[in-house]
Image (cartoon, rainbow, N blue to C red):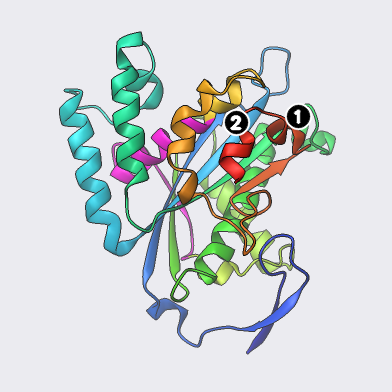
């Protein structure tokens, strides 16, 4: 069977042969978290962002040890949460540095971010007035890139198991129906067959990986909310720059980071050269 693939984002369309037994591929576990809100009022966040943390199955035990170790270190039985456990007090600077260094050392991890800049993104009124539709569209953008990353995984393709953080007020079944329509009605060129279907939504207590994804998203969120000239806000984000997916020439935009809107929202920032180099 031969299908059309758009290739990694930014590449011209090409052709690829679908593996005969995708289900027999090695797995990569994917954990998704989000930052910001989905609203468009004057009180809404300027960004809505999502991250996918892709952990090859052989590194999952390592990730679980890190999550358990961090909970023990900060003496909590609750799921790890960047805002609650790592940012409220100045004395938590050491916690942040520890968490950043530990997750940056998980072997083989690939991270992907989608950042919707509400001020510059081009979107129909339905996305600006329907929070569920907006969420589903950003999720689509993220999972498309997960599919490409799974297909083009180093040393051979993988099958991605996508687990997303639940959002209050969002119906998982509606998201699945939307994503199925995208997948089955030719609305995407991404090789979605490299994602085990359907993706699932869970509370952070269910999977350590969702707590780890919250840490990654917290680091990106800190960088996004800093001033354009502030290098320090991206200190922890830069710790895992090597894990952000890149193209063959080292490019980040369109590969490891998709900006829904004007990429200047990132590229004008003082920390961008360090991240993208």
Q: Return the mark for residue 271.
A: 2
Residue 271: within the magenta? Answer: no
Q: Which residue is mark 1?
A: 129
Dot 1, crowdedness within 10 Å: few (<14), some or many (≥20)? some
Whether 132 is drawn above or below 44: the answer is below
- Image quadrant occupied by the N terminus: bottom right
In this view, the residue in front, 189 or 90, is 90
At 29% across and 40% down in the image, what residue appears?
Answer: 102
Q: Quadrant of residue 37?
A: top right
Residue 130 spot, x, y in % from top left: 71, 33
Visible residue check, residue 227: yes
Q: Return the mark for residue 7.
A: none
Q: Quadrant of residue 246?
A: bottom right
Dot 2, crowdedness within 10 Å: few (<14), some or many (≥20)? many
Q: Quadrant of residue 97?
A: top left
Whether 92 is drawn above or below 178: the answer is above
Residue 220 spot, x, y in % from top left: 52, 32
Q: Secondary structure at mark 1?
A: helix
Mark 1–mark 2 CB contact (< 8 Å): no
Depth check, mark 1 against mark 2: the one in front is 2
Residue 91 spot, x, y in % from top left: 30, 11
Visible residue check, residue 218: no
Residue 208: within the magenta? Answer: yes
At 61% across and 44% down in the image, what residue appears?
Answer: 276
Span colored in magenta: 196-220
In this view, the residue in front, 117 or 105, is 105
């Amino acid at each position: 069977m031969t299908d059309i693939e758009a290739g990694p984002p930014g590449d011209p369309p090409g052709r690829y042969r679908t593996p005969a037994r995708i289900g027999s591929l090695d797995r990569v576990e994917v954990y998704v978290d989000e930052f910001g809100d989905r609203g468009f009022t004057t009180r809404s966040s300027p960004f809505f962002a999502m991250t996918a943390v892709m952990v090859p199955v052989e590194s999952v035990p390592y990730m679980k040890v890190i999550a358990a170790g961090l909970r023990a270190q900060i003496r909590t039985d609750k799921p790890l949460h960047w805002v609650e456990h790592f940012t409220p007090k100045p004395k938590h600077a050491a916690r942040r540095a520890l968490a950043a260094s530990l997750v940056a050392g998980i072997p083989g991890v690939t991270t992907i971010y989608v950042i919707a800049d509400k001020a510059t993104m081009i979107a129909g009124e339905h996305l600006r007035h329907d929070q569920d539709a907006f969420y589903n569209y950003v999720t689509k953008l993220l999972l498309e890139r997960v599919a490409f990353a799974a297909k083009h995984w180093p040393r051979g393709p993988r099958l991605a198991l996508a687990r997303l953080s639940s959002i209050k007020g969002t119906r998982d079944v509606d998201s699945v129906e939307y994503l199925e329509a995208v997948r089955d009605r030719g609305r995407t060129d991404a090789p979605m067959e490299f994602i085990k279907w359907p993706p699932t939504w869970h509370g952070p207590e269910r999977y350590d990986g969702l707590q780890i994804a919250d840490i990654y998203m917290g680091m990106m969120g800190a960088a996004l909310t800093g001033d354009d000239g502030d290098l320090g806000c991206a200190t922890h984000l830069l710790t895992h720059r090597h894990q952000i997916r890149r193209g063959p020439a080292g490019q980040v935009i369109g590969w490891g980071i998709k900006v829904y809107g004007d990429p200047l929202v990132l590229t004008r920032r003082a920390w961008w050269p360090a991240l993208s180099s």
